[in-house]
Amino acid sequence: MLLIPCPWCGRRDESEFACGGEAHIARPADPDAVSDAEWADYLFMRTNPKGAHRERWVHVHGCGRWFNVARHTVTHDISAAYKVGEKPPGDAS
Amino acid sequence: MREQSHRLAEGGRIDRATPLRFTFNGRRYGGFAGDTLASALLANGVSVVGRGVKYHRPRGIFSAGSEEPNAVVQLETGAHTLANARATRVELYDGLVATSVNCWPSAEYDFAAALGLLSPLLPAGFYYKTFKWPASLWMTYEAVIRRAAGLGRAPDGPDPDRYDKINVHCDVLVVGGGPAGLAAALAAGRTGARVILADEQNEMGGALLDGHDEIDGAPAQDWTAEAAARLDAMDEVRCLPRTTVFGYYHHNFLAALERVTDHLGPQDAGVLPRQRLWRIRARKVILATGAIERPPVFAGNDRPGIMLAHAARTYVNRYAARPGRRAVLFTNNDGAYRAALDLRAADVEVAAIVDTRPEPTGDLPAEAESADIELIAGHAVVATHGRKRLSAIEVMALGDGGGQVSGEARRIPCDLLAVSGGWNPTAHLFSQSGGRLRFDATGACLVPAVAAQATRPAGAGNGTFALDGCLAEGWAAGAAAAAEVGSRARGRAAKAPGATVTPEEPPGDYGVVPAPGHPEGGPKHFVDLQNDVTAADIALAAREGYGSVEHLKRYTTLGMGTDQGKTANVAGLAILARLGGTDVAGTGHTTFRPPYTPVTFGALAGRDVGALSDAARRTPMHHWHERAGARFEDVGQWKRPWYYRHPGEDMAGAVERECLAARNTLGIMDATTLGKIDIQGPDAAELLDRVYTNAWSKLEVGRCRYSLMLGEDGMVMDDGVTARLGRHHYLMTTTTGNAARVLAWLEEWLQTEWPELRVYVASVTEQWATITLCGPNARRLLAEFTGDVDLGTQAFPFMAWRAATVGGIAARLFRVSFTGELSFEINVPARYGLGLWTAFMNAGEKYGITPLGTEAMHVLRAEKGYIIVGQETDGTVTPADLGMDWIVSSKKDFIGRRSLGRTDTARPGRKQLVGLETEDAALVLPEGAHLVENPGQEPPVPTIGHVTSSYHSANLGRSIALALVKGGRGRMGEAVHVALEGGAARAVIRDPVFFDVQGSRLHG
């Protein structure tokens, strides 16, 4: 069971959280401007990396806040947890 | 009760002053406090404790620990019974009752073994091969195999025992209380670090309890007692005996099972639970898990009387029980010589030591020779004799580098063969933690190599087998772990405990011990005693292409079962490696998975059973419903009245009565459970616009609107009515089961996608009690309770809401309807719910007011063709599929809108909601039944849809049904067939609205 550092509450057991899948998937600003394929990509397609992964979690049995976590999918090492709207650590863009 | 024929007169860690009685396979025996069930059985000379799972050959006690493959018993009877208890780990208590598993009718006389029934049926891959045959044949076999290959029986009633869970954090968790673990705990504990020391045995000491070692110049068992006492005296150290750490999960989370009162037997333990599940988050972990002796694989190696050498030593030393009277040792290493010396000291005649090494030169072999024990070096055991107990063995000289045997076989009578093929570090937890193992060619074993978490293996569990090394490594690990968490010892320096040990030569070759005729035929070389997997099975699997370790395991069942191959896996890997011309480093090993030893379901469930398994939510009117004869149904966590049964009524009668009352006079329903979400803020309307299919900005204060909520995939997710309470204030209602999900959904979008919206959402479901009055007399009754609001349809039309005083209580009245009748939903603060309900019931008597359950409500709404999300929808249904395009705005964006134009959602031929009228008006179709065009055609018959809702309608005097049918709206009036058990029924497709199509009652 992971120990997840909630940016508001500190480190808590995974059982207090729910995972919301891959993070930083932007909803197309104008859905009508994208093709069916692009929409399907937004809707269904997720990366499934072996390694570094940024994902959304919600502290559902805690503060109720959504936030992002950078987790290694093999070692489960959590290198960062950051709030919605914040840039992922190491992201220069 | 007979004499304990194999009990030593003195010695051991048993208490002869506390005799205990127990029953095994119906016979009564005696033992002593301090015994395990296994040691007590041995002390009584019991040789057969079970039967092999496939061949049903008799089996005896093989080990003295958790690795036991054979002595697996059914402990106790009835509801308390525990299947698959390892007799070697069951502490004896007075009155214990145990029976063998895997045998019928008894372990002594086994039917299948007597007839040789199963052996030809069960080659490697038997189950796979069987599944390829017609399924019917498997059914035939299954009944036979289940009885023959039984692995224990389930309890026959609910578990009467209590179980607890406890969550803890610690600086250092030390797993294993042997020399390395004790040293580690002492080193960490003296710094003041918070330490937990867990060991599966009843007392700390590990293997030190089995021998005569010395530590710091004193008997090791004295040192152990002193160490345990010192640890107990440390404030931040917690010692947990009888506690097996069985799982090592992510981020140093470990689970342990403490057997709190198991050793007392089934009894009222007072405040104590039977077992306790420890959920431990440790900053550092030290794995001092010891090692498990591995057996050599030789011909006929499964007879009762053959056991691991260290186990034999343990039984005489620790339990004062002689596992035999005349012993032979069979070994490839020095360590087993200790067993020979100890057996001899316990008056067991040691006939010989058979060593596969050509010239054992170590100190221990020398000691054995000087004690006049015959050493037969360069030889191997090639055959064993005896049916229910070993009577003799045969040995032959090894040649060809150990690959062949030659010369005359020499027969040696004996009733105990103590065997050792070396030791395997207990690396289970290390491997579970993600750590990598490496194959150590010298010890022929897998040892921890690279840790993946904050964990340190130490001692025998790390491949450091000698006592001095265990102590030093454990001490160093404990000190280092404490230092890493910032805990440092004060006061004078302390020294690691030390020991002087007899050096041991490296073990000899480990693999299949040759025998005449093998491998082509001849006697069986068992690798996995619990699963009856032989060396020949492994060879067969390899020949048939199952040469990878994970395939081999599943094909042969090697390493499965309750012992998970603790004595078998490395042997199996070694054999497979040799077949492939490699070694275990080349084959790799199968994944070690939790649990290390079996865990009871009771412990995993803890107190979360029965009424506590899930929260039950009850409305303020719940007890009234109970008294009124309500039968309840679970909707999410809510208990909702399903129907109210009057005396002499069945469910159908009750539902019919309720439905008629709602249409003809007055129904009353508890709608408190509907989800209510309070939405406030300047952007509230904008939020609604984005999450609902229709437009909200023009909705006036005082009005309500029904809408659909879609997933981003365009599929219907929820529906409900939302009212505008004020300029920036709305009240959203959701379906009962979806309330939490919808709230979470709104939160997710607000937090992650639209943080700029100035709006707050909060659940107010439990703050309000909701009473629905419906039927032609609803307005009349409500008028008696209100004076400050005009209930007339002009002033208070359908889909409006009004603040009003109802029976003196400030309330919100919503003119909405799910039944198609004139209907008011009255929301009052929850604490007034029961009072108002009772008042309505009293005043409504003159109208024949009738409480409605959910079933009546479902019938009434189906008469109107109203959907229920989750019944008419299943996550693949769009608004258009339901014929509800009218509610979908084309002028704005909302969640899911873009998906409605995707190729698949827009294609013709999708399933659409229709009504169904059966030809036989009395026939109520089963929900879920499939519709077909031509039931007469050859199967498979393509389905064109399915029934989603189906009821008898008392108001219409016939059955009604809703269905999703491919292209359904284009099939109005068409006949279809409903596939039913025993034939098909005809039905006609029609509009889904069966009753009051104009909606005049609704608006009246």
Image (spheres, coloured by chain):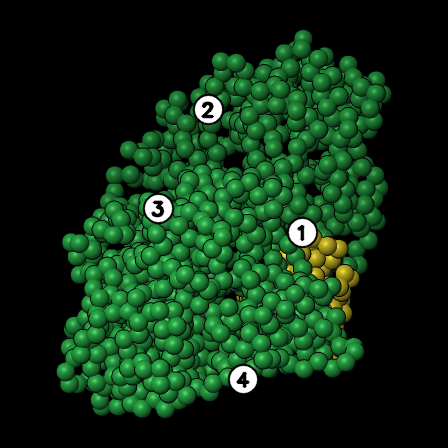
* B218 relative to B353 in the view: left or right: right
Label 2 – label 3 distance at C-alpha: 69 Å
Q: Which chain is green?
A: B
Label 4 – label 1 distance at C-alpha: 67 Å
Asked if marks 4 and 1 touch (Cβ < 8 Å), the reply is: no
**Chain at numbered mark 1:** B
Residue pointed to by mark 2: B952
Mark 4 or 2, which is nearer the eye? 4
Q: Are marks 4 and 2 on the same chain?
A: yes
Q: Which amino acid type is marked by label 3?
A: Met
Q: Is residue B819 above or below residue B319?
A: above
SS at mark 1? helix
Q: Earlier in the sequence, mark 2 or mark 3?
A: 3
Q: Are marks 2 and 1 on the same chain?
A: yes
Asked if marks 3 and 4 touch (Cβ < 8 Å), the reply is: no
Mark 3 or 4, which is nearer the eye? 3
- Residue B619 pos. (x, y %): 68, 31
Asked where in the image residue B509 lies, by quadrant, the reply is bottom left
Which quadrant: the C terminus of chain B?
Answer: top right
**Chain at numbered mark 4:** B
Residue pointed to by mark 4: B500
Q: Which amino acid type is marked by label 1?
A: Trp
SS at mark 4? loop
Chain A visual colour = yellow
